[in-house]
């Protein structure tokens, strides 16, 4: 395990395992990561930035909370990174050692490999992260794709999961194409469209 440097080398890979690009340009990648780092400066509690070597490559982890407290692993959704937890980390880290992990293949500081959803790869990766962090077991809190990743690890190695908290986990039911089409159209309507999307997801 090592601390993560703030700067990036110009030769870092930008291809996924399938050969498709995560970022459309190196400049876009730089801007996304600069915005990520700027938001992390507003992290409301003490923060350690760690990089661990896993079976897929380097994985970026934000660690907060008492070092001797029970461990809690946070897993964000697709198209995001660990900064999504900035509003909750103060409460979560009061009596937990919290590890917010950037998923692979998403716009964070973890390797840009994107393993397939079907099969054990995501779960194996998460267990590899836990190994490198020295966690024999932990509670897992996953949002959307992070929930699916947590579920994969829990079904593969249930003894290593103390508790499992899933927020709108992906992969539980089939994708709803009509929902995606409507949500895409509502995005164009601004605030009123966003309100409709929230009602679609959460009800009234």
Image (spheres, rainbow, N blue to C red):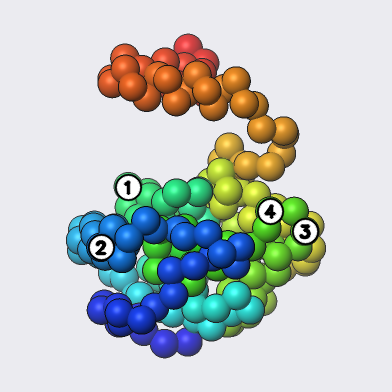
Q: Residues within 10 Å of mark 2 (few under 14, many from 20)?
A: few
Residue 111 relative to residue 24: left or right: right
Q: State which mark lies toward you, 1 or 3.
A: 3
Q: Which residue is mark 4?
A: 117
- Mark 4 and 3 residues: CB-CB less than 8 Å, in contact? yes
Q: State which mark lies toward you, 1 or 4.
A: 4
On the question of residue 194 being in view, the answer is no
**Real-space CA distance between mark 1 and mark 2, rounded to the nearest whole angstrom:** 28 Å
From this view, report whether residue 188 is shown above or below residue 91.
Answer: above
- Mark 1 and 3 residues: CB-CB less than 8 Å, in contact? no
**Real-space CA distance between mark 1 and mark 3, rounded to the nearest whole angstrom:** 33 Å
User: How many numbered markers are drawn?
Assistant: 4
**Real-space CA distance between mark 2 and mark 3, rounded to the nearest whole angstrom:** 33 Å
- Residue 83 rendering spot, x and y as whole percentages: 35, 55
Q: Which residue is mark 1?
A: 87
- Mark 1 and 2 residues: CB-CB less than 8 Å, in contact? no
- Residue 185 rendering spot, x and y as whole percentages: 42, 20
From this view, report whether residue 67 is shown above or below residue 144.
Answer: below
Residue 119: numbered disc: 3
User: Residue lying farthest top?
Assistant: 204
Residue 91 relative to residue 160: left or right: left
Q: Nearer the viewer, residue 197 or 112?
A: 112
Residue 101 relative to residue 47: left or right: right
N-term mark: 1 or 3 = 1
Q: Nearer the viewer, residue 172 or 166?
A: 172
Q: State which mark lies toward you, 2 or 4.
A: 2
N-term mark: 2 or 3 = 2
Q: Residues within 10 Å of mark 4 (few under 14, many from 20)?
A: some
Q: Which residue is mark 2?
A: 27
Q: Residues within 10 Å of mark 3 (few under 14, many from 20)?
A: few
């Amino acid at each position: 395990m090592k601390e993560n440097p703030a700067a990036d080398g110009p030769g870092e890979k930008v291809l996924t395992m399938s050969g498709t690009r995560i970022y459309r340009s190196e400049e876009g990648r730089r801007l996304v990561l600069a915005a990520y780092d700027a938001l992390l400066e507003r992290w409301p509690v003490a923060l350690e930035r760690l990089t661990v070597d896993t079976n897929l490559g380097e994985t970026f982890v934000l660690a907060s909370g008492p070092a001797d407290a029970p461990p809690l692993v946070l897993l964000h959704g697709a198209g995001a990174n660990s900064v999504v937890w900035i509003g909750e980390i103060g409460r979560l880290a009061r009596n937990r050692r919290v590890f917010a992990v950037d998923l692979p293949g998403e716009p964070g500081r973890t390797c840009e490999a994107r393993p397939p959803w079907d099969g054990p790869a995501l779960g194996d990766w998460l267990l590899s992260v836990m190994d490198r962090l020295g966690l024999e077991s932990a509670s897992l809190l996953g949002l959307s794709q992070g929930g699916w990743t947590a579920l994969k690890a829990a079904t593969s190695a249930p003894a290593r999961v103390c508790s499992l908290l899933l927020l709108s986990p992906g992969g539980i039911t089939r994708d709803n194409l009509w929902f995606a089409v409507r949500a895409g159209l509502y995005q164009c309507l601004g605030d009123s469209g966003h309100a409709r999307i929230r009602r679609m997801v959460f009800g009234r």
